[in-house]
Amino acid sequence: MIHTDLHSYEPRGGHGLPHDPFNAIVGPRPIGWVSTRGAGGQVNLAPYSFFNAFNYVPPIVGFASIGRKDSLNHIEETGEFVWNLATRPLAEQMNASCAAVPPDVNEFELAGLTPVASQRVVPPRVGESPVAFECKLSQLIRLQDADGQSVDTWLVLGEVVQIHIARSLLVNGIYDTAAGQPILRGGGPADYFALGEKFLMRRPR
């Protein structure tokens, strides 16, 4: 069937809908739950809804920071970060870690999570998360629009230098994605998914 009844628009002129559909179309997306430590020792933990894997060898993951956030500042200072798998059992803690708080607030403490020392990078990983990637910054790119004008978004790409996987998620040596219960970001203002299960969760204010 060829679709002829279309809602078409130029993004620069606005979408004319109750909520921007772009995020919903490009989704559901993995969550970039990123832990960092600044040069001064301050620890930060924050989720990013624009995250994915970009390369096999070497393994490279990346996330986009829309605006200058503590995570971006820390990574610029130290060149290191950790990605932690956000799971359904950890959904509320992940959500708590996205609260808009001052830089001196430790989100591990705020969300009741355990920082565990990494092996090859300085930032800690989330002890309760069954999977973590220790990463070293490979590229930091400020995005531009089609006219070459800089936008207020930075793409952070990091090489994964150490991987931690709970053995309970390895079935005959194969990683069981479903058993990991990853939560994924949907497109609505509060939409998340957990491999077929959709649930609603509002950001803290």
Image: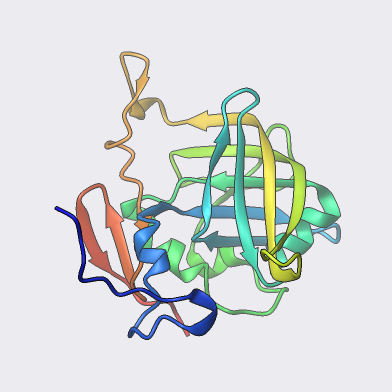
Task: Give the number of callouts.
Answer: 0
Residue drawn 60% across the image and 60% down it: 45
Viewed as shown, does residue 114 lie left or right of 36?
Answer: left
Q: Is residue 32 visible?
A: yes
Please, is residue 189 above or below residue 75 in the view? below
Q: Residue 139: percent from the left, percent from the top?
A: 76, 45
Quadrant in the rendering for residue 61: top right
Please, is residue 160 above or below residue 77 in the view? above
Q: Residue 152: percent from the left, percent from the top?
A: 70, 72
**Residue farthest left in this picture:** 1
Residue drawn 40% across the image and 57% down it: 26
Q: Residue 106: percent from the left, percent from the top?
A: 64, 67
Which is nearer the eye, 82 or 13? Answer: 13
Type of colouring: rainbow
Residue drawn 37% across the image and 50% down it: 87
Q: Is residue 42 visible?
A: no
Viewed as shown, does residue 139 lie left or right of 85?
Answer: right
Viewed as shown, does residue 63 lie left or right of 17?
Answer: right
Which is nearer the eye, 168 or 199? Answer: 199
Quadrant in the rendering for residue 168: top left
Q: Residue 10: percent from the left, percent from the top?
A: 47, 75
Which is nearer the eye, 117 or 189? Answer: 189
Residue drawn 53% across the image and 31% down it: 164
